[in-house]
Image: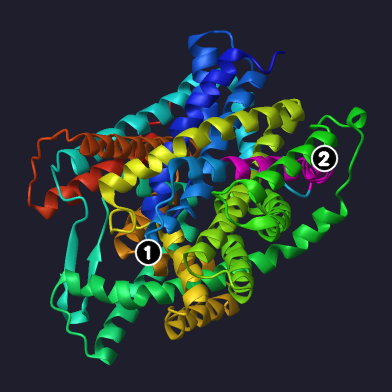
Amino acid sequence: MRELTPRAILLGLILAVVFGAANAYLGLKAGMTVSASIPAAVVSTAILRGLLKRGNILENNIVQTIASAGESLAAGVIFTVPALILLGLSPSIFYIFLLSLTGGILGILFLVPFRKHLIEEEHENLPYPEGTACAEVLQAGEEGGKKAAFVFSGLGVGALFKFLTSGMKLWEGVPSLFVGGLRTLLGVDLSPALLGVGYILGLRIASLVLSGGLLGWFGLIPLVSFLKGIPVNSIDDVYGIWSHYIRYIGAGAVLAGGVVSFFRGTPTFFRALRSLRIERSGETRDLPMRYVIFGVFIVFVLLVFVPLFRIGAMGALFTLLFALLFVAVSARIVGIVGSSSNPVSGMTIATLLVVSFIFARTGLRGERGMVAALTLGAVVCIAACIAGDTSQDLKTGFLVGATPWKQQVTEFLGVGVSALFVGWTLFLLHKAYVIGSPGLSAPQATLMSLVVKGVMEGTMPWYLVGTGVFIALSIELLGIHSLPVAVGLYLPLELSTPIFLGGILASFGGKRENGILYASGLVAGDALVGILIALLIVLGVHIPALRTPSKSLAVAALLVLALSVLYVAGKFRKKY
């Protein structure tokens, strides 16, 4: 069967841009992204085999491989690059393109020598959950039309709901209740994307995220208000305490949770490193090692000599070292826990702490030092994201009989095309919504900027950060992974509540696979309309607003959306 066909490559590139843009919006809004592999496989099967009547399983595998490259590249970019915007450093679109391209290329190249061991030799020990599930979707090709209907239905519902909420303002987008007696507030973001994310994550992780939110907003905010004597008479007062105090405590918790997750995964790096082998090109189905070595050398030269990077030879060496380290860690961790639980933010924070400290001690401070540290961290973060996602794709390919080097080549195509668009998407969203505002909080990037600025300039309130660190360590001592709790502590509470609602819906039963496909569509529809509205705002196009002040209508709309998820999952439908 043919694999690298023009139709498969073209469809994959289109989906890479679409899912990349959707995940950029979602990551900036909620600090998390979702895998595009399964939705892309479903859409590809429906189009190639359903509409065109010509596709085969290997072509569909190429489509999802390219599409998922766009999603993972966007994740790496939005976790780090907006930190430069938040620090007032104004990165150019060309600079973002170079960061994306170099990080993506390193992620693919450094994974090549590990592939045979991780994917084939460790087949029984490393299940790669998303990769295995995607293979099952591809192998059930005759069901593609039915499965695609769930994705497209979710996309349509999510898009309509988002347009009515944020475009026409038919109801409040974030209905909130000020609880004066407790000096806090309870809110919920009416976002189909967040509801879909909660369904995909499941009840346990969604509950951990909410627990962090409740700790921050119903525990720490009233406590800070009392101890500091800060009056709380309005919603703005609550957000003021969150911005000046709780956000730094949450940053410390995310920092500690990420570092603990990293050290928990270090044994996987050493096991993978021991298995690294350089084989002659005639003995492997991967890209020949001479190409890998040459590609890494070219990236090194670019990092050293391209003026925009400004990290020098030492910085370039650190980039290659940390990228190799975290590509190996990322590729093995996702084989066990899946891409959604990959602690990339912890790896990036560890990188930034080390390089910021070294740069500061060697005299590279101020704006130049912060740009250099964030440049290095962004390339490493993108490489780790790409490696985790690529390893899932290679697992899918292994299960369906694909050729590894062909998948690796198409990953380069997905990275290259997505890198062209991700910077435009980032600036479009920033111009419309403002990165760092409550509507587009960019939690990971904000944390990265705090870490770099704090180390470089000594401006971080370390007593608040330390409080968050020990909160996370206490949670770890209870035998609970602290990172989801820390994310909830760091995020505004209204983002955690719809995620928790989605987790509750996932626990109701029914056909969870159908629900996940529908939830993936909700995420895509919400994000794409969010980008469309941003474009209309930038172009000055007026959308007629039909705002209804009643909070009850907003709650009713959310209830209808939740019931649609249960219906698609088969909870209310008769079984024939």
Given residues 503 and 33, the one toward you in this image is: 33
| Residue underneath mark 2 | 116
* Left or right of residue 477, residue 521 in this image: left
Instruction: Tell me which amino acid carries mark 1.
Output: Leu
Q: Would residue 35 be seen by someone viewing this image from the given angle?
A: no
Q: What residue type is labelled 2?
A: Lys
In this figure, which colouring scheme has been used for the structure? rainbow
Give the structural element (helix, strand or loop) at label 1: loop
Q: Residue 51 appears at what percent x and percent y?
A: 48, 11
Q: Residue at x 78, y 45 (%)?
A: 118
**Nearer the observer, 231 or 312:** 312
Q: Is residue 392 left or right of residue 97?
A: right
Q: Is-magenta flag for residue 108?
A: yes
**Residue numbers of the magenta segment:** 101-124
How many tags in the picture? Answer: 2
What's the CA distance linking mark 2 and mark 1?
39 Å
